Image (cartoon, helix red, strand yellow):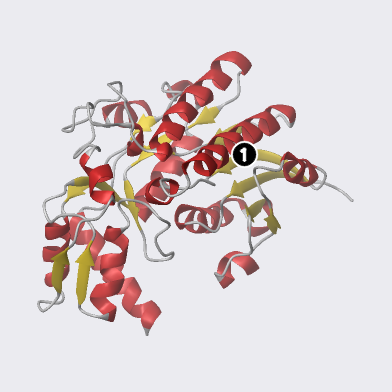
Amino acid sequence: MTKKTNAVLVIGACGQLGSELTLELRKLYGDAHVVAADIQYPKQAELRESGPFEIVDVLTPQHLSELATRYKFKQIYHLAAILSATGEKNPKFAWRLNMDGLFNVLDFALEQKVERVYWPSSIAVFGPNTPRQNTPQDTIMDPNTVYGISKQAGERWCEYYFNKYGLDVRSLRYPGLIGYKALPGGGTTDYAVDIYHQALATGTYKCFLSEHTRLPMMYMPDAIKATLDLMHAPAEQVKVRSSYNLAAMSFTPQEIATSIQRHYPSFAITYDPDSRQQIADSWPQSIDDLAARQDWGWRPQYDLDTMTDDMLLHLKRINN
């Protein structure tokens, strides 16, 4: 059997980011050249049917080795992780998946001479003593969730593999991501996805964060664009090898509700903060992403109202 060469591997392809990124990569490189991988088969028919899909557990290095017998990978996007709120329910397993999974992918990339690796970080790397306004690229990082701790450690390891072994690893610190193609995956910012679904389904929403909780957010098309822009940038322009700050907008639950009410004036929101409030209170309210803008030309395209318009338009089409 001849290996498929110049293939792209997306691990965690069934997740909120992975499901959309995989389809965009298939548009760029051709369906047959982008291998989607996850621990279970995707429910999304388009993801399952548009190109190759492989069952992969990143905690089992043999799974990656078996892929190498069929594909010669040029790029790997390693997205598999347990997110902030879910991770607090089983912190030791979250640490194991997030860290051992990363090591397995980095080592596999070295062994197979993969040209570029992408691994996402998060604003969860920041903590209670980080400046909350215009959080700098380089600043105090004292995360207080296992997700944030694993992302901070992962940043250091990605930079280490670049400096020590020359592995071209690239990373972005995502804010909260909002998209219509996949349901929330257990993160602290998930309310900003669910609120749109509930606005259409019931006309009401009970938010697990307080009304004035301001957090950095980003619409999924901007997140996909930023990821691909970074991965396609010449290596000499990628000057940050831990992870780049990334920003688009910041808003509160009250502000997103107001944006939705432009379309549905009767939409009502109530507030019942839970354990995720403490996590949110330790995160930045706005991000300084000057390094990404200067190094490889990052520019977001969506603000709160243009995102709301697009989200509601697509969700109405899906529901109809």
Amino acid on which disc 1 is placed: Gln
Q: Residues within 10 Å of mark 1 (few under 14, many from 20)?
A: many
> Residue 33's x, y, as percent?
67, 52
Q: Check the image and report above or below for 267 versus 26.
A: below
**Residue at horizontal 73 percent and vertical 43 percent from the top:** 64
Q: Check the image and report above or below for 97 versus 198.
A: above
Relative horizontal placement of residue 173, taking residue 73 as reference (left or right): left
Q: Quadrant of residue 165?
A: top right
Relative horizontal placement of residue 43, taking residue 187 as reference (left or right): right
> Residue 305's x, y, as percent?
18, 60
**Residue at horizontal 49 percent and vertical 30 percent from the top:** 154
Q: Check the image and report above or below for 169 versus 75.
A: above
**Residue at horizontal 68 percent and vertical 46 percent from the top:** 7
For the view shown, which residue lies furthest in the top direction? Answer: 164
Residue 95 appears in the rendering: yes
Q: Which residue is mark 1?
A: 75
Judge by depth and name the residue closer to the eye, 152 or 271: 271
